[in-house]
Amino acid sequence: MSEIRELVVALPEEELREFVLAQRWYGSKSEEVASVRAVDAFPLREEGEPLLAVAVVEVRFQSGTHDLYNVPVGLRRGAGGFTSVDGWAAFDALESEQLVLDLVGLIGKQATLEHEGGMLQFGAVDGAVPAGPVRAMGAEQSNTSVVLDERLVLKLYRKLEAGVNPELELLRFLTERGFPAIASLQGWAAHVGQPLDATLAILQDFVPVRDDGWALALKDLEAGGDGFVGLVRGLGEVTGEMHSILASDAADPAFAPEEPSGEALALIVARIDEEIEQVFNSLPDEPALEPIAGRGDDLRDRLQEIGQSGSLGRLIRHHGDYHLGQVLWTENEDWVVLDFEGEPARPLRERRHKRSPLRDVAGMLRSFSYAASASELEHGVEPPPGWEGQVRSEFLAGYLAKVDPALVPADASLERRLRLFELEKALYELHYELGHRPNWVRVPVAGILQLLDEPA
């Protein structure tokens, strides 16, 4: 075992625990933690100072489960950092411009670094990387991003899961085909071997933006709600073009569109029915939930109405977590789509499955409803009459004008499938808010009420 690997694995557990649990990217704050330790380390820089390694940090819970985290660690002799070991101070490597540039330099060189049990692989689209300066992207949650020379973004995946991250797959596919409405892929870092095969980071273009879609919608609602309606048709067009390109290569097994099985729709309905049962059987007794309390059977009846037999369209790779916070309105007045990882609460292997592209469409429609509810419930600004309906219509018009018609059902089946996936998304939102943001529970509650009370 190399010296740096020995040092990182020997990091004191108490200080490591304090450091990891305090980070925004640590995702299990409600779990009772049993232990935090570095179970492995992949050396990246073993000469000179500071040293650099990727620590694999295991957070083990009292329940017996565990998560693995990607924690780049710098080591320098002396004091400082979040802990020390054998006279070396350990610190967050992403706080060092030098170490960030070292890491990105490995991507540019398309390096392969072997270690006991596996290897680190770095890839680049064209091999060009900037020299700096480096700055933090800003407030983030599940991942960490830094900007280099205002031209590239290094995005580090913090929670490690076995397999290729869907964002790397989708960005590479879309970049190779020249899709303009993304921050194009420029490189990546991955680990192969023990303890797991996993994507560690991607490098992509930096896109100067005015606002993300969520902020843009809420600001517009505060100003009267007229401007966003005029922009959202373009967002629908970008979404339709994205889905068409993702379904454009029948020769690639990972992306070739598929016909759903005969029982696919019934299985979706059954899964949503089970989610309704789980959610409504465990609803806490809180005032914000009173409007839907005891209405699980009503929601099941609504599910049967919108889950009637009919076309499902084709199954393709899709964004997987599509909402206003995942799209940017740029300084060039264009829409750009970000964050192709899929819903973070779902296992990585599930996020790579092919599904109906209407799941993305429904996610964005739910986001419009979310924005309307949040404007009123959280900011005291009531949307103009008909705002949500206008935005919905414009987005769908743009989408249907650009998407390959073979991918989606037509006419009444289209509307039923959209409502089906909107219900699925609203249940996911309710579950998420109950666990992470209780003050926002009333927003998905309003969405579920809307689905319950609208005409069949």
Image: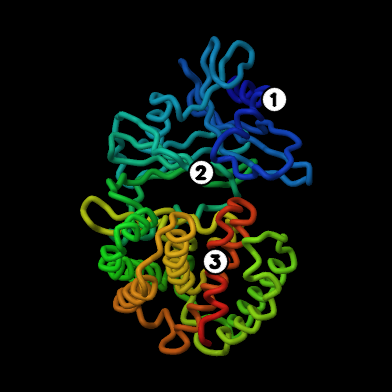
Q: Which of the 4 image quadrants contains residue 101?
A: top left
> Can residue 237 be seen here?
yes
Q: In the rendered image of this protein, does residue 194 appear above or below residue 309?
A: above
State left or right for residue 212 relative to residue 231.
right
Q: Which of marks 2 and 3 is nearer the N terminus?
A: 2
| Element under disc 2 | loop
* Residue occupied by mark 1: 14
> For the view shown, which residue lies furthest in the right direction?
63
The residue that label 2 is drawn on is 141
Which residue is nearer to you in this view: 53 or 228?
A: 228
Tell me how far mark 2 sits from mark 3, CA to CA: 24 Å
**Residue at mark 3:** 353
Q: Residue at x 49, y 29 (%)?
A: 44
- Nearer to me, 205 or 213: 213
Along the polypeptide, which appears first: circle 1 or circle 2?
1
For the residue marked with disc 1, what is the amino acid? Glu
- The reply to whether callout 1 and callout 3 are in contact (CB within 8 Å) is no
Rendering coords of residue 344 (x, y %): 56, 54
Say if mark 1 contacts mark 2, CB within 8 Å: no
Which residue is depicted at the point 58% across and 56% down? Answer: 348
At label 3, counting other C-alpha atoms closer than 10 Å, the crowd grade (few under 14, some 14-19, many 20 or more) is some
287 vs 302: above or below: above
Q: Residues within 10 Å of mark 1 (few under 14, many from 20)?
A: few
Kindly identify the amino acid type of the residue bearing the numbered disc 2.
Gln
> Could you tell me how far apart the alpha carbons at marks 1 and 3 are, in whole angstroms?
39 Å
Q: Disc 3 marks which amino acid?
A: His
Q: Which of marks 1 and 3 is nearer the N terminus?
A: 1
Q: How is the image coloured?
A: rainbow
Residue 317: tell me if it is visible: no
The reply, left or right, for residue 456 in relation to residue 332 is right
Q: Where is residue 395 in the image (x, y as percent from the top left)?
A: 34, 72
